[in-house]
Amino acid sequence: MATASLNPSSTAISHPRLTDSHRRVIHDLRVSITDRCNYKCVYCRTGEVGAQYPELSIEEYLRLIKLFVGLGITKVRLTGGEPLLRRGLVELVQELARMRTLWDEPLDLALTTNGHLLDGLAAPLKAAGLHRVTVSMDAVDAPTFERITRIPGSFETVLAGVRAARAVGLTPLKINCVLLRGFNDDQIEGFAQFARQEDVVVRFIEFMPLEEGRLWSPEIIVPLKEIVERINRVLPLVDLPAREASETARRYTFEDGVGEIGIIAPVSQAFCGACSRLRLTSDGKIRTCLFSQVEHDLYGRLRAGADNAELRAYILQTVQGKEARHHIGEPGFLKPSRSMVHIGG
């Protein structure tokens, strides 16, 4: 691990950064706290498969997350499945908000949700210490939205959650839209208007082969270039600079500076070279890439009685094996051993 310089905003002693064998700094941990979900989105689930993996206790998640933070993680994002289904979520956020990074700063705490339960939980989560949310929302008209989620009445429910989160200050509030040609690619221009009207950051995501079924094909992807061209015809875009090297989205604003669009293009413009992420599944497995074929059983070692020093050594060993890149679209590519809902976003 390479040594980092002292953070100028902190008087803490300089600590080694957590790095992999490709010299990438790893500072972002995504923790799935359930693989249950109350939606059956057509690009994600078959509609027949529910939870497949056990959940740890809140105390066990906290113990494991603390190990990662002690090694240099500075950002934790809670995911699922649908994390708002998890009992004890507010208490988990409260405890995470008390943790300090190696540089004696508070953790950057975020959460990704489908938004269905957000209206009632936005204020408690903000009070507990959550900084912001990302809402998965794949259309801006009710019929299309509900055809994708397969849940009647879901559009208005999610829209109420988005507005509640914005009202309590869980901002910048991001809206993630997975685009599929022939399903919701007619929503692009509407989302551009939505970003401006609702004061949210809309991010379009290229469809990746992470669904439970076999829907994915290269032809169904809507690439970055096409998205930009279509928005430019109605609302001209201006490039925004990246905030950090590991940022996944290409960022744009509009000519008048009102609103922001992001495009995450892992298929057509992969960003593996600056990847800063690890994932911890709901059953306590480390995944070093969304497309990993191997999982690393951290929780199994905890249950077998490993102490914190042994667990930290296992995390360090696992990080050194992090893949250089994914191989989507290449000959011999294999889908990961779990679908997205069972990995965690």
Image: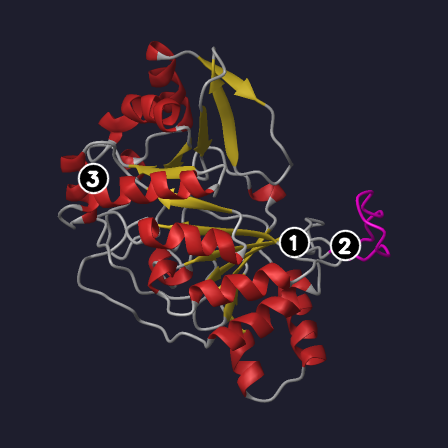
Q: Which residues are magenta?
A: 1-17
Residue name at image x 46 percent, y 39 percent:
266
Near mark 3 (Cα within 10 A), the count class, few <14, some 14-19 or many ≥20, is many
Residue topped by disc 2 = 103
Q: Amino acid at mark 1?
A: Thr
Query: Cα distance, mark 3 to mark 1?
Result: 34 Å
Quadrant of the image for the N terminus? bottom right
Looking at the rendered structure, which numbered label has been put on residue 291? none
Near mark 2 (Cα within 10 A), the count class, few <14, some 14-19 or many ≥20, is some
In the image, 90 versus 31, the foreground residue is 90
Query: Which numbered disc flags the more N-terminal residue, 3 or 1?
Result: 1
Query: Which numbered disc flags the more N-terminal residue, 3 or 2?
Result: 2
Residue topped by disc 3 = 145
Residue 294 % position (x, y): 49, 66
Residue 252 % position (x, y): 49, 22
The answer to whether residue 225 is seen in the rendering is yes
Mark 3 falls on what kind of element? Answer: helix
Q: Is residue 231 magenta?
A: no
Callout 1–callout 2 Cβ contact below 8 Å: yes
In the depicted structure, whether residue 21 falls above or below residue 258 = below
Residue 223 % position (x, y): 38, 29
Q: Amino acid at mark 3?
A: Phe
Query: Which numbered disc flags the more N-terminal residue, 1 or 2?
Result: 1
Callout 3–callout 2 Cβ contact below 8 Å: no
In the depicted structure, whether residue 176 falls above or below residue 56 = above
Residue name at image x 13 percent, y 48 percent:
152
* Residue 263 shown left or right of residue 241 in the figure: left
Q: Quadrant of residue 337?
A: bottom left
Mark 1 falls on what kind of element? Answer: loop
